[in-house]
Amino acid sequence: MKSFLDDAPVDAMGRRALATLSNGELEVVADAVTPFEDRRAVIEWMTRCAVHSLGQLPDGWFTAEGTAVETAVLFDRVLMSALLGRPWGNLSNVDEGWAREQRLGLLAKDLLPALHRGVREIRWNATDYTAPQEPVDPDPSNQRHPAMRPGLSDLLTRAEWLVERFLDGFESGAEYLSWATFATTATYGELDDEVARRAYFETSIRSALLSTEGDLARGRFTRENWAAKYLLPAITRTAQREAARGHEKDEAAETDTSIPST
């Protein structure tokens, strides 16, 4: 998909942060063109979507709690079958062409509007490098931070770690408490303390958190549901606040280009 935009006039976009944001948006869009390996891979993709959309995806996109079930991707047998490219739930057959159209439809209906809202959130805060007395014009292709905001890169690193470790499960209650402690600060307090506490004390959830106990497949499914209901929305809210309060930084400015004296 990116190759289609190889000749796009990115240099004509004076607000370089928007051009950089577009690069990340294209990556998450391209990821969904082909099927995902499993439901966990979909959750990991959603984590990236949460950050690259600058927190503009609604909670109902992740979980059915308090919303119509059909709006929550991870609980929709049709959408999940399309994302996986094979039957999920009680769907009996999946045609490859149909699945691709469903995935593209999901991108057009849900992800594209969220990416649009993200652009609108930062568009006038992005530095216009064509204006007088602005710093050296950065090259958008050399920027690794979403919207040239290092805080968003740091958040994505933390978010991917939180999701990976949670979906893996824990060896003990102490491991989970260590994870929950870090999750509190990593999401800037957006993961509710009552939610984290309840997961420890409720027997059914705690059993699912421990990766070596009981029905392992059921445990994985429960952890995926918990991540969709609580963790992904918390990451989304953190991304929204980070985007609003973060500052631009030119990647090239982080590199020392001085020549050492001999």
Image (cartoon, helix red, strand yellow):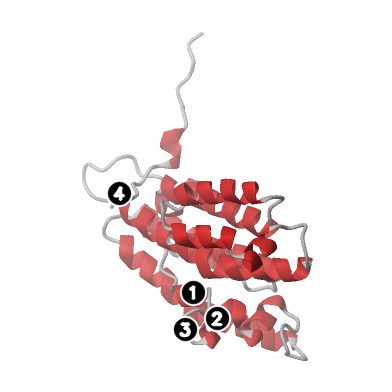
**x then y, percent, for residue 133:** 22, 41
SS for dot 1: helix
Earlier in the chain: of badge 1 and badge 4, it is 1
Mark 3 vs 4: CB contact within 8 A: no
Q: Which circle marks residue 106 in the picture?
A: 2
Along the line of sight, the residue nearer the viewer: 68 or 148: 68
Q: Quadrant of the N terminus?
A: bottom right
Left or right: 156, with 90 as reference point: left
Along the line of sight, the residue nearer the viewer: 220 or 251: 220
Q: CA distance from mark 2 to mark 1?
A: 7 Å
Q: CA distance from mark 1 to mark 4?
A: 29 Å
Q: Nearer the viewer, mark 1 or mark 4?
A: 1
Earlier in the chain: of badge 2 and badge 1, it is 2
Three-letter amino acid code at disc 4?
Tyr
Note whether residue 52 is visible: no
SS for dot 4: loop
Three-letter amino acid code at disc 1?
Leu
Please determine whether, in this image, residue 81 is positioned above or below residue 261: below
Q: CA distance from mark 4 to mark 2?
A: 35 Å
Judging by the rendered image, the residue that carries numbered circle 3 is: 67
Neighbour class for label 2 at 10 Å: few (<14), some, many (≥20)?
A: some
Three-letter amino acid code at disc 3?
Thr
Judging by the rendered image, the residue that carries numbered circle 4 is: 129
Neighbour class for label 3 at 10 Å: few (<14), some, many (≥20)?
A: few
SS for dot 3: loop
Please determine whether, in this image, residue 15 is positioned above or below residue 174: below
Q: Residue furthest left?
A: 132
Mark 3 vs 1: CB contact within 8 A: no
Earlier in the chain: of badge 2 and badge 3, it is 3
Judging by the rendered image, the residue that carries numbered circle 1 is: 111
